[in-house]
Image (cartoon, helix red, strand yellow):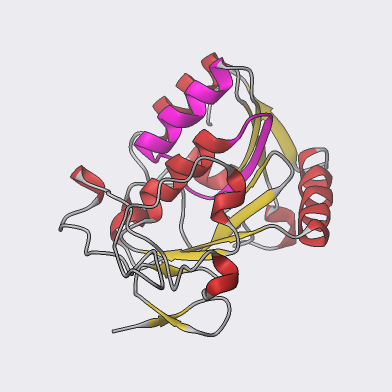
Amino acid sequence: MSWFGLSGQRSSRHGAGTGGVGDGGRSGFPTIAETGRNNPEPAPAGPSSSSAGGAQSQWLPSRLEDFVPRVIFYPFIGQSFVDAIKCAEHTIIATAYCFDHEEGCAALRQKAEQGVQIRILLDHGKWRNPSCMMQPQRIEALMRAGVTFRTLNVEERGRYAILHTKSFVFDGLVYMGGSANFTNNACVSEENLIFVRDQQIITDHLAWFESLWHGPGASEITTGTSRT
């Protein structure tokens, strides 16, 4: 079974870059070793990292530019959360519906302790009544590390109106979005993540984020804030 990458070229199931020689010879998404709870079965071998030699190797991103443009699928969702967070050096902004990815939260906490400025906007209703058991504890731990959280309440638009976007912007350079919630369950589900580095997309997304962050429906969460 195969998938189409952003370029429309066929690639392996694991994800795709733009492919071809212009993309460093990558024909698809190289192997990421993801084991443990978030990967119930061994990760299959990724496609060749060299169009000439055909040798397989692990993809170990060390900077944000390594992620773009790229679309990612199971079983690499969780590791991509973590790797992208670890590459950020200055700022991270995020919007989330559900929020409890264990390793991702640990990476965010480490970045906050290193001085990276992190702001996260959550859906108000899902914050009050979380479906992820560990979400309240993980948010509390991140706030103690210096992460700023706000919730957004858009219920005045309609009974079922919610904040449903799942997005990150790292250092104002790289956008990550897609279907995947920032949760452990997303790592074993059929989801996608798309990484883009496009100045217009980043500018528009940051403007949208700031309008919500400072808008009338936003409320800041502080340590010990009641969810009722």
The residue depicted at 41 percent of the width and 73 percent of the height is 51
| Residue 98 location (% of width, % of height) | 47, 47
Q: Quadrant of residue 15?
A: bottom left
Question: Quick check: can you spot residue 164?
Answer: no
Question: Quick check: can you spot residue 85?
Answer: yes
Query: Up-down: is 196 above or below 170?
Result: below
Query: Up-down: is 59 above or below 132?
Result: below
Residue nearer the viewer, 84 or 189: 84
153 on left or right of 144:
right
The residue depicted at 43 percent of the width and 37 percent of the height is 104
| Residue 160 location (% of width, % of height) | 59, 62
Where, quadrant-wise, is the N terminus in this rendering?
Answer: bottom left
Residue nearer the viewer, 92 or 214: 92
| Residue 36 location (% of width, % of height) | 19, 43
Magenta extent: 88-113
Q: Quadrant of residue 93?
A: top right
Query: Up-down: is 202 above or below 86?
Result: below
The residue lying furthest to the left in this view is: 41
Number of numbered markers: 0
The residue depicted at 70 percent of the width and 52 percent of the height is 154
The residue depicted at 57 percent of the width and 17 percent of the height is 114
Residue 100 magenta-highlighted: yes
11 on left or right of 156:
left
190 on left or right of 8:
left
| Residue 144 location (% of width, % of height) | 53, 14
